Image (spheres, coloured by chain):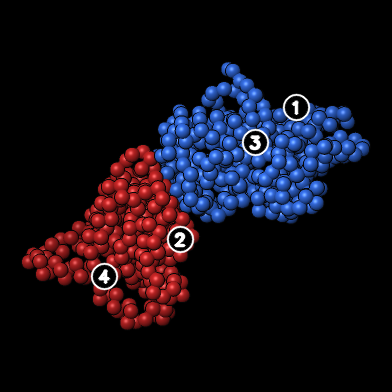
């Protein structure tokens, strides 16, 4: 969690230098899910995500240097500068891409599960999306398809309560739960209300185990909160679309702060451990940014290459 | 190599058999693939031959089916996804345009997306505004896609085999009125390359560029045009993205006249693109202004009474050619037929 947060904090700081020139959606505050992913997913498992996908990429084991270089549009980027922050990929760890279109990657994750099943491979497909995507038609189509064909897919909805500035209250009827809908569709569903990394880990482990056993698709909703603006490096609570009390409440439940508090209780040497961790993380991040900044842009001619894959 | 006469439908079905028996990663799904009608008979027998993990019927979910094909392809499969009407597939445009067409380019050429989407275009028998659209120009507008439109049974088989073996997303458009057409088809496994047009007829006076159903209309026109002393180069594009520009340029260089024929709406059509490109590139070689013969910019109506003079076809092509080649007379009478205008032939009794 700390690693993912520090990476995104560094992106937020560097963004002001005008060298990261692409829309960038940070998920600071939402680290519990990708941290659990890092513990649970096998490198052979698949994952797809969204425009807010840095954390899932890193949680799945995606290469940090390639990601940062991609944000800078460099040839060493994970998509050779053709994707940017919203289009991250690292096939070497099964992270098969992110989409900037809400809901777009959900059926792609289902298809990865289909491949795993048809080819009789032991791969679970993780599909990450926000609660806004659950308002898209393709979400329902995808869950239904995964359910009817009993595919090894784990759908993970991070409900951060806002679609850009639009609150849940204008988007979904009061009192209706997303898990109520998904359960009715025949998909085993669990909701995590309390943003605690241990709890997220527990629920995700159960779901992944079930999917791996061939018990069909699983759905998990985790209530979470993004601290910064929808897109960009700044806080935006001056706009007044979120109540100050609500922000404060979620900040109090910060998953990292809570984990550190738990650490304080259980480990006497926690301070030394944390300092060492922070130092390692900072060194890795600094090195990744140095690498990205020092890397060249792709040759301009590359813009016109790669429309098609050549038949081998 | 041995061959025999087969229908377009049989050719498509055989292509599936060749593909699935030579490559275990090929799967085939779509609404009705395993039902008694089996997508107009094009997928009959596949389930028995290859099993329900590789051949299956699906929910009515065009978007998810397309996205799932992308994912399946990323995971090592080669899906063939069939839709009984092109119009139904429009719900999946996001998956096709933002997903399938982009995944290879957008992620720096690491991830081929070998999927084939079969779309069938309807016409006549009151198919009306939403069951008969020829929107190939939409697909052809999108970088990253290949768009294939076979005319003959032989090409249908060879092009489908190539489409599935191609590492890119391919939209494979079949005109429903061609399904019962017959022609000599080679036995076994063979490919017809994508992006290569065919010279269906060779002549001196004019180049006719067409595709799919319009190639058959143009072929009818060329036979009548012989009696006017006009001989035609007839080019069947076969693939409308990428377009085989060389074959068109070579032909126009020889004939100095160009007519582009399209089953789609005129505005923004492939035919317009062909005329535009050839005018810019070969203006000085042209002996007269080129022409487009395409569908009117209006939805296809339903009523038998409204469709009689709605579609362009062989007479329109022939009359345009007659004028362009400085001949005289209306050729329409040569095309009079006892078959009703809203069916492909007398075998067709409706409803699809």
Q: Secondary structure at mark 1?
A: loop
Q: How many marks?
A: 4
**Can you identify the residue that label 3 sits on?**
B179
Indicate whether B231 appears above or below B36.
Answer: above
Same-chain status of marks 4 and 1 = no
Mark 2 to mark 1: distance in Å? 51 Å
**Can you identify the residue that label 2 sits on?**
A102
Q: Chain of mark 2?
A: A
Q: Secondary structure at mark 2?
A: loop
| Residue B99 at least partly seen | no
Contact (Cβ within 8 Å) of mark 3 with mark 2? no
Q: Which chain is blue?
A: B
Which one is closest to the eye, mark 4 or mark 2? Answer: 4
Seen at 49% across and 48% down, the residue is: B66
Which one is closest to the eye, mark 4 or mark 1? Answer: 4
Q: Chain of mark 3?
A: B
Same-chain status of marks 1 and 3 = yes
**Can you identify the residue that label 4 sits on?**
A194
For residue A262, side relative to residue B44 (left or right): left
Mark 4 to mark 1: distance in Å? 75 Å
For residue B317, side relative to residue B17 (left or right): right
**Can you identify the residue that label 1 sits on?**
B202
Which one is closest to the eye, mark 4 or mark 3? Answer: 3
Q: Chain of mark 1?
A: B
> Mark 4, residues whose alpha carbon is within 10 Å: few (<14), some, or many (≥20)?
some
Mark 3 to mark 2: distance in Å? 38 Å
Q: Earlier in the sequence, mark 4 or mark 2?
A: 2
Q: Secondary structure at mark 4?
A: loop
């Amino acid at each position: 969690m700390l690693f993912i947060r520090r990476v995104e904090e560094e992106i937020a700081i560097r963004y002001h230098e005008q060298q990261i020139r692409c829309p960038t959606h940070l998920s600071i505050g939402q680290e519990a899910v990708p941290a659990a992913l890092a513990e649970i997913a096998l490198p052979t498992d698949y994952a797809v995500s969204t425009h807010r996908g840095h954390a899932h990429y890193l949680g799945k084991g995606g290469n940090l240097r390639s990601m940062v270089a991609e944000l800078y549009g460099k040839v060493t980027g994970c998509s050779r500068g053709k994707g940017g922050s919203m289009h991250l990929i690292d096939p070497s760890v099964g992270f098969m891409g992110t989409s900037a279109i809400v809901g777009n990657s959900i059926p792609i994750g289902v298809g990865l599960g289909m491949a795993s099943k048809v080819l009789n491979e032991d791969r679970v497909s993780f599909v990450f999306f926000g609660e806004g995507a659950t308002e898209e038609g393709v979400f329902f189509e995808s869950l239904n398809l995964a359910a009817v064909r009993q595919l090894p897919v784990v759908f993970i909805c991070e409900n951060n309560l806002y679609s850009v500035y639009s609150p849940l209250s204008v988007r979904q009827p009061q009192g209706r739960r997303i898990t109520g809908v998904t359960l009715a569709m025949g998909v085993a569903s669990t909701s995590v209300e309390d943003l605690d990394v241990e709890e997220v880990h527990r629920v995700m482990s159960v779901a992944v185990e079930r999917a791996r056993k061939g018990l069909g698709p699983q759905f998990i909703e985790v209530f979470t909160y993004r601290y910064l603006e929808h897109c960009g490096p700044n806080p935006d609570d001056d706009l007044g679309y979120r109540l100050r009390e609500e922000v404060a409440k979620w900040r109090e439940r910060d998953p990292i702060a809570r984990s550190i508090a738990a650490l304080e209780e259980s480990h006497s040497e926690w301070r030394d451990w944390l300092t060492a961790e922070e130092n390692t993380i900072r060194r890795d991040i600094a090195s990744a940014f140095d690498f990205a900044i020092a890397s060249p842009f792709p040759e301009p001619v590359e813009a016109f290459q790669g429309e098609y894959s050549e038949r081998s | 190599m041995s061959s025999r006469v087969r229908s377009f439908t049989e050719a498509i079905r055989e292509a599936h058999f060749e593909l699935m028996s030579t490559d275990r990663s090929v799967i085939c799904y779509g609404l009705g693939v395993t039902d008694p009608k089996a997508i107009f008979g094009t997928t009959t027998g596949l389930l028995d031959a290859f099993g329900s993990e590789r051949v299956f019927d699906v929910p009515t979910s065009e978007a998810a089916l397309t996205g799932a094909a992308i994912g399946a392809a990323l995971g090592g499969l080669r899906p063939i996804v069939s839709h009984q009407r092109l119009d139904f597939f429009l719900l999946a445009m996001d998956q096709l345009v933002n997903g399938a067409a982009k995944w290879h380019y957008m992620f720096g050429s690491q991830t081929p997306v070998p999927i084939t989407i079969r779309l069938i275009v309807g016409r006549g028998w009151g198919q009306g505004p939403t069951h008969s659209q020829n929107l190939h120009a939409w697909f052809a507008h999108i970088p990253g896609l290949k768009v294939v439109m076979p005319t003959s049974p032989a090409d249908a088989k060879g092009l489908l085999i190539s489409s599935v073996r191609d590492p890119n997303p391919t939209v494979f458009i079949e005109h429903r009125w061609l399904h019962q057409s017959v022609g000599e088809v080679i036995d076994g496994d063979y490919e017809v390359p994508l992006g290569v047009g065919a010279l269906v007829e060779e002549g001196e006076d004019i180049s006719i560029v067409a595709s799919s159903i319009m190639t058959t209309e143009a072929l009818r026109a060329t036979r009548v045009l012989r009696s006017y002393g006009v001989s035609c180069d007839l080019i069947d594009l076969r693939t409308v993205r990428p377009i085989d520009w060389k074959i068109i340029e070579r032909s126009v260089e020889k004939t100095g006249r160009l007519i582009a024929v399209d089953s789609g709406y005129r505005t923004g059509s492939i035919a317009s693109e062909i005329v535009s490109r050839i005018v810019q590139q070969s203006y000085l070689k042209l002996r007269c202004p080129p022409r487009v013969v395409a569908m009117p910019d209006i939805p296809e109506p339903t009523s038998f009474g409204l469709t009689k003079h709605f579609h362009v076809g062989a007479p329109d092509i022939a009359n345009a050619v007659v004028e362009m080649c400085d001949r005289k007379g209306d050729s329409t009478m040569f095309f009079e037929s006892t078959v009703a205008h809203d069916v492909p032939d007398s075998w067709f009794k409706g409803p699809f």
